[in-house]
C-alpha cells in the first residue's frame, strides 16, 4: 500500500531532534558554527545535542559559555568529580574549554579523570599540553611545580580544531 505523506507531516519530520542534529553537524562540517548553534536552539535536551552546542561554542571562541554547558554535562549536580558514564569526548571537550578559558588546573584535572588514555582526543590534548610545558620559562616551571598552573600567563595552544563528537566528526 502506497501512502502519501502530507506536506505538513514532512515539515514536522524535518524538525525532529535527530534531523536538527544531523543538519547542525552538516553545518559544523562546513564550518558554519554560528548557523549550527542557532539551529541547535531547537534541538532536544539530549546529551548529543548539548555536546554539539558545546562544540560550536568552542569553535566560535566562546569558551566561558562552553565551560558552563559542559559543567552541567560532565559533573553531577553539586559534585566536583567527573561522572564516569559521560562519554570521553565530552570530558575532553570540557577539559579543552577549561584550558582555553585559562582554567589550567581544572582542565588538567578533568583530563586526568577522562579514564581513557588511549582515546585519540585525550592523546591530542595531552600532546598540546606537553608542547605548552616545553615553552615554560624557568619562572613558569617553578610556578608549575608549586601548583600555580592557573597563574600561567601563556595559554595551551591547540594544533587542532576544538570539539569532538562521539561519531568521530572532527575538523583537523
Image (cartoon, grey):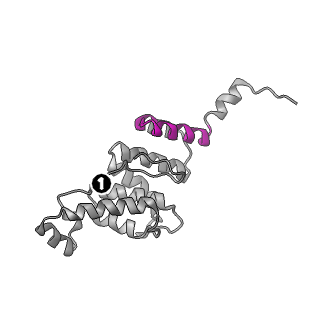
Judge by depth and name the residue closer to the eye, 170 or 53: 170
Q: State yes or no: residue 20 in magenta.
A: yes
Q: Is residue 30 magenta?
A: yes
Across and down, in percent, residue 131 comes to: 26, 61
Which residue is found at the position 23% from the left and 56% from the top? Answer: 155
Q: Which structural element holds mark 1?
A: helix
Residue 4 visible in the displayed image: yes
The reply, left or right, for residue 137 in relation to residue 162 is left
**Is 104 located above or below residue 63 in the figure?**
below
Q: What span is colored magenta in the figure? A: 16-36
In the image, taking residue 140 as reference, residue 71 lies left or right, namely right
Question: What is the residue that sits farthest to the top in this orientation?
Answer: 7
Out of 99 and 40, give the one closest to the viewer.
Answer: 99
Identified at 54% across, 51% down, the residue is 167
Residue 94 drawn at (x, y percent): 40, 58
Residue found at the very far right of the displayed protein: 1
For residue 150, what is the image quadrant?
bottom left
Residue located at (33% from left, 50% from top) = 63
> Dot 1 corresponds to which residue?
100
Horizontal placement of 67 versus 46: left or right? left
- Magenta: predominant secondary structure element? helix
Q: Residue furthest left?
A: 139
Task: Determine crowd level at label 1: few under 14, some 14-19, many 20+ residues with C-alpha closer than 10 A.
Answer: many
Judge whether residue 71 can be spotted in this image: no
In the image, 146: left or right of 43?
left
Amino acid at each position: 500500500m502506497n501512502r502519501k505523506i502530507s506536506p505538513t507531516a514532512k515539515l514536522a519530520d524535518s524538525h525532529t531532534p535527530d534531523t536538527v542534529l544531523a543538519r547542525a553537524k552538516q553545518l559544523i562540517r562546513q564550518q558554519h558554527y554560528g548557523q549550527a548553534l542557532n539551529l541547535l536552539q531547537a534541538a532536544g535536551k539530549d546529551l548529543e545535542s548539548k555536546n554539539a552546542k558545546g562544540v560550536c561554542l568552542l569553535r566560535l571562541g566562546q569558551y566561558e559559555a562552553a565551560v558552563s554547558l559542559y559543567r552541567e554535562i560532565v559533573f553531577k549536580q553539586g559534585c566536583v568529580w567527573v561522572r564516569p558514564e559521560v562519554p570521553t569526548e565530552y570530558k575532553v571537550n570540557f577539559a579543552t574549554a577549561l584550558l582555553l578559558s585559562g582554567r589550567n588546573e581544572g582542565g588538567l584535572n578533568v583530563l586526568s579523570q577522562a579514564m581513557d588514555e588511549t582515546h585519540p582526543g585525550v592523546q591530542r590534548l595531552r600532546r598540546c599540553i606537553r608542547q605548552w610545558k616545553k615553552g615554560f620559562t624557568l619562572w613558569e616551571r617553578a610556578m608549575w611545580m608549586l601548583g600555580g598552573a592557573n597563574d600561567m600567563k601563556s595559554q595551551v595552544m591547540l594544533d587542532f580544531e576544538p570539539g569532538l563528537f562521539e561519531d568521530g566528526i572532527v575538523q583537523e
